[in-house]
Image (cartoon, rainbow, N blue to C red):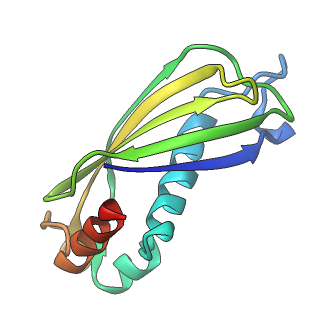
Amino acid sequence: MLVRDFKFRVWYKDTDQMGVVYHSNYISYYEAARTELLRSCGASYADMERSGVMMPILEVHSKYLRPAHYDELLTVRVTLRELPAARITFEYEICNESGELLNTGSTVLGFIRSDTRRPCRAPRAFVELLGRCMEE
């Protein structure tokens, strides 16, 4: 299992008229945390795309438990429980500075060849990189 925490402060632009983080912004928070998790293992979306493989989102699930507000320091914990084959699943928990759980979610991404847009398996080098990262 691979777990990383990503911290950030809520920007004003991410909130609605009530000062609450607008629901769709949680998906962006997931993406930022997922990107940083991959980067912490030495991988990146840019490298993957240069190798001819893209990772489209297939599913997104988000459960809103408590609101997040402007200027709060949030922590997104992203978890990868298993190595990918044709899909990769990430799980998320978002907490505020007090440690209160605000949101949970998950995303499922697939792997496709960028030239044909046809599904493929995760590149072996990518899987090996994640495997080494999980062992640390």
26 horizontally vs 98: left or right: left
Question: To which quarter of the image does residue 10 belong?
Answer: top right
Position of residue 50 in the picture relative to residue 25 (left or right): left
- Side of 6 relative to 135 (left or right): right
Q: Which residue lies most toward the front here?
A: 136
Q: How many marks?
A: 0
Q: Residue furthest bottom?
A: 50
- Residue 51's quadrant in the figure? bottom left
Q: Residue at x 14, y 63 (%)?
A: 119
**Residue 14 relative to residue 23: left or right:** right
**Residue 14, image x, y percentages:** 75, 37
Q: Quarter-wise, where is residue 49 in the image?
A: bottom left
Residue drawn at (30%, 63%) of the image: 135
Q: Is residue 102 above or below residue 133?
A: above
Q: Quadrant of the C terminus?
A: bottom left
User: Residue 129 in the image: x percent, y percent?
Assistant: 30, 74
Above-or-below relation of 58 to 99: below
From the top left corner, tell me how far across and down residue 108 is, in percent: 30, 44
Q: Is residue 41 above or below residue 74?
A: below
Task: Identify which residue is drawn at 55% across, 24% down.
Answer: 103
Residue 43 rendering spot, x and y as whole percentages: 41, 74
- Residue at the image position 21 percent from the left and 57 percent from the top: 83
